[in-house]
Amino acid sequence: MSSIELGSVVVDALVGLGVTDVVLAPGSRSAALALAVDRADRDGRLRLHVRLDERVAGFTALGLAKESGRPAAVVTTSGTAVANLAPAAMEARAAGVPLLLITADRPAHLVGTGANQTADQVGAFGPSALGVVRLSSESGDAAAWATGVQRAVTAATGHRTRQPGPVQLNLEFAAPLVGLLPEPEERRFDVARSAGHSVAELDGRRTVVLAGDAPPAVGAEARALAEVAGAPLLAEPSSNARSGPNAIAGYRDLLADLGGAIERVVVVGHPTLSRPVTALLSRSDVEVVVVAATATWPDPGHRATMVADRVLLGDQPDSWLRTWRDADRSGAGPGFTRRHVADLVLAALGPADDLVLGSSSIIRAADLSPIPAAPPRVFANRGLAGIDGTVATATGIGLAGGRPTTVLLGDLTLQHDLGALVRPPGEPRARLRIVVADDGGGSIFHGLEQGAPDYADSFERVFATPQGVDLVAVGRALGWRAVDAASPAEFTAAWAGDAELIVARVPRP
């Protein structure tokens, strides 16, 4: 979208979020915002106040917000204009006043090039700002910009944190900066005012409950929500909701055939595992409702229109859940693969156990495993989904809870954390067992664009990166009772024995 179109999106979102006053200091880079807010003022949608000096503009906005209790916005161009808002930002932070610091910016690739009126202004207010939302016209679309404004206003008002204050909304506009303004669009958002007190009541349109990475208590809420309403439960392994009669084991594959009938998704936790889920959350014809009691919430598709602490979901048609259940027929097939290893581990664990999953191919294999009758608690580092530190994280979980803890991970994930296999003498030890699905490299890339035949000459060296490490020998050298397993029977025997480290030899896809 053009800069002028995105400027209009910002102003439409501000109006929809209840902002009634905008203070503008004139400038070139903020032209799209100036034109959009001027039209909104003439249309009676908000009030525009123009001030020559940015410092004066900042304090004027502060006064508007201070008296009204509503967030007020101040708009500046790029460069030193931004720095002049610092005094008002400092006061707003100390006084808890909701203030939107909307700073127009040049495209990021111009920073450091000597381009006119260009500075590294993201985060210019340091600790005075509660947060920073950064948007670029070179890569943004209307939904991304609208939800960016939503996050900024929500943070400034303190609706999720009970701590109002200043927030920087940094908007990178590329030339051309002016043009024909599009027609205003009504944009409405519903964000819970404070954690623990909001309940959204939803009607009975066809809904799925999507449960992503979450603590056990949150996972239990997701499962209960689906079961009370009779909705399909699409639960990732570390959601701690992947159990019960509504959980659909093969949901990831079923989305291709059944996903088109979904009218609403209720998101609980942080879903991160699959592209079909990301595509579902990006659809314009699907209502996305997020259940979150935190200051931030997941919305990768920029489509969430409601955030609530709890949801009451209307009863679903019996045929809706039945359709998903009847189609759920995923199986591991013959052989001994990552999927077989995941199935065997999950079947062997129960409610008294903890399971820690590596954040690569193995957690996606577990995402297709049958729904266990009595699952373990499941953990994974899905905040940023890195493969580093998995064994050390599991050690901490095991030490804190004192429960038997199994780590299920790939060979590269273990090699990233070999230092965690060292158990210093005299230190407390977790009750840890490690299972490695060793396929000799980063097999996750086989399923991504890098796995295409066009890149075959480079694939092994720069993507799969096999290390040729004998993990059984390494484990034994560090004092672990380590064994190989090359079949389901060998794995079962190793599990039944006293092995602390089981290296399952599995093929690449």
Image (tube, helix red, strand yellow):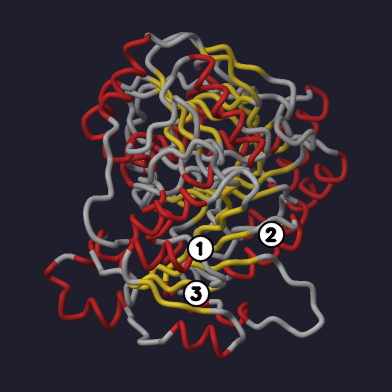
Residue 484: image x %, image y %? 41, 76
Task: Give the residue type at disc 2.
Answer: Ile
Residue 85: image x %, image y %? 72, 50
Task: Give the residue type at disc 3.
Answer: Leu
The furthest residue to the right: 95
Asked if the residues shown at circle 1 and circle 3 are in contact, with their CB atoms under 8 angstroms apart, the answer is no
* Residue at left offset 54%, top offset 86%: 476
Vertical arrangement, residue 138 with respect to residue 241, above or below: below
Visible in this render: residue 111? Answer: yes
Horizontal arrangement in the rendering, residue 321 relative to residue 104 (left or right): left
Q: Earlier in the sequence, mark 1 or mark 3?
A: 3
Q: Nearer the viewer, mark 1 or mark 3?
A: 1
Q: Which residue is mark 1?
A: 496
Is residue 79 or residue 366 the one in the foreground?
366
Label 1 to label 3, Cα distance in Å? 22 Å
The crowding category of the residue bearing disc 1, from other C-alpha atoms within 10 Å (few below 14, some 14 to 19, many at least 20), is: few
Q: Nearer the viewer, mark 1 or mark 2?
A: 1
The crowding category of the residue bearing disc 3, from other C-alpha atoms within 10 Å (few below 14, some 14 to 19, many at least 20), is: many
Residue 148: image x %, image y %? 52, 40
Horizontal arrangement in the rendering, residue 453 relative to residue 469 (left or right): left
Q: Which residue is mark 2?
A: 397
Label 2 to label 3, Cα distance in Å? 17 Å
Task: Give the residue type at disc 1.
Answer: Ala
Q: Which residue is mark 3?
A: 414
Image quadrant assignment for residue 338: bottom left
Q: Earlier in the sequence, mark 2 or mark 3?
A: 2
- Point out which mark residue 61 bears: none
Label 1 to label 2, Cα distance in Å? 23 Å
Is residue 270 or residue 130 the one in the foreground?
270
Tag 2, which secondary structure? helix
Horizontal arrangement in the rendering, residue 210 relative to residue 335 (left or right): right
